[in-house]
């Protein structure tokens, strides 16, 4: 039997780039971004959201009287003899306001919660991934027939057996899917068909990356990564 290399989940490929990370308790600004944006404990941040675009914007300043702003705290680490400094702010009051943001904060893999910021006017902006924040039993009557987006089917043991896009309830009710073995449907609402394609592809690629290039069972059976949900 061949040796299998263990993949680390606590590192981030491309961490030499600036990024902003989301967790349930903190929003972190890495060393590179801290340097570029000239951040430190003397700065504060005001956070803005565009829920329809899954975007967060960060405005850094020194105005201690700015309403709803957050203090920045310094984090220091010593890796390979080199001092690295990053900053963070509290996230609890931010994350719990938006289900789509909370879903991202709960993603188990750190690299799925890290996003490269871009400067837009006076804001540093990140676009988050949709993270299947809605969860229903496959027998649920609470899924509206007019909802479209990306979705995935899971078994009780957590195994993902399908990732798709399109009309969530209509696809769920297709006759051929009534024999499929799954218990839960998780989904994110996305109206734009092009964005549905984009994020379906994103999550299929992430699944393959974590499963030695394999597709979810029913994507594989359908014979294509780009499935019949168009």
Image (spheres, helix red, strand yellow):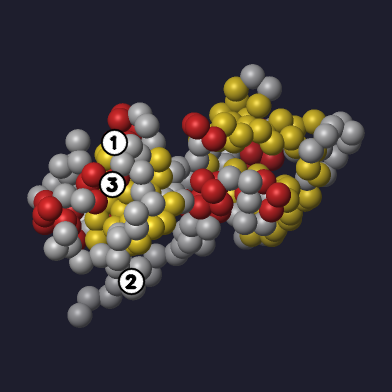
Report if residue 6 is visible in the image: yes
Q: Residue furthest front?
A: 141
User: Mark 3 and 1 residues: CB-CB less than 8 Å, in contact?
Assistant: no
Give the label, 1 or 2, closer to the camera.
Answer: 2
Q: Secondary structure at mark 2?
A: loop
**Chain-order first, disc 2 or disc 3:** 2
| The one of 204 and 158 positioned closer to us in this rendering | 158
Q: CA distance from mark 3 to mark 1?
A: 17 Å
**Residue positioned most to the bottom:** 1
Q: Which residue is mark 3?
A: 169
Residue 50: x, y in percent? 57, 31
Position of 192 with respect to 118 (left or right) is: left
What residue is drawn where x is 11% and y is 54%?
Answer: 176
Quadrant where the C terminus lies? top left
The answer to the question of whether label 2 and label 3 lie on touching residues, with beta carbons closer than 8 A, is: no
**Nearest the eye: 161 or 139:** 139
Marks 3, 1: nearer the viewer? 3
Work out whether residue 211 can be spotted: no
Q: For mark 2, what is the residue?
A: 156
For disc 1, the marked residue is 197
């Amino acid at each position: 039997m061949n040796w299998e290399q263990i993949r680390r989940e606590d590192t981030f490929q491309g961490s030499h780039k600036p990024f902003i990370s989301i967790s349930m308790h903190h929003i972190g600004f890495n060393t590179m971004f801290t340097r570029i944006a000239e951040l430190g404990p003397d700065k504060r941040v005001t956070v803005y959201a565009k829920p329809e675009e899954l975007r967060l914007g960060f405005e850094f300043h020194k105005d201690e009287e700015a309403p709803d702003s957050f203090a920045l705290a310094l984090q220091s680490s010593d890796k390979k003899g080199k001092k690295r400094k990053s900053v963070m702010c509290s996230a609890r009051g931010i994350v719990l306001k938006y289900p789509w943001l909370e879903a991202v904060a709960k993603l188990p893999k750190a690299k799925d919660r890290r996003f490269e910021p871009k400067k837009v006017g006076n804001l540093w902006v990140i676009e988050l991934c949709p993270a299947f924040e809605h969860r229903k039993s496959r027998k649920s009557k609470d899924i509206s027939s007019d909802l479209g987006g990306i979705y995935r089917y899971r078994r009780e043991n957590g195994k993902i057996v399908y990732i798709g896009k399109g009309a969530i309830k209509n696809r769920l009710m297709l006759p051929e899917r009534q024999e499929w073995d799954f218990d839960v449907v998780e989904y994110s609402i996305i109206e734009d068909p092009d964005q549905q394609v984009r994020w379906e592809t994103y999550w299929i690629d992430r699944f393959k990356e974590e499963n030695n290039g394999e597709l979810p069972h029913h994507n594989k059976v359908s014979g294509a990564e780009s499935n019949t949900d168009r």
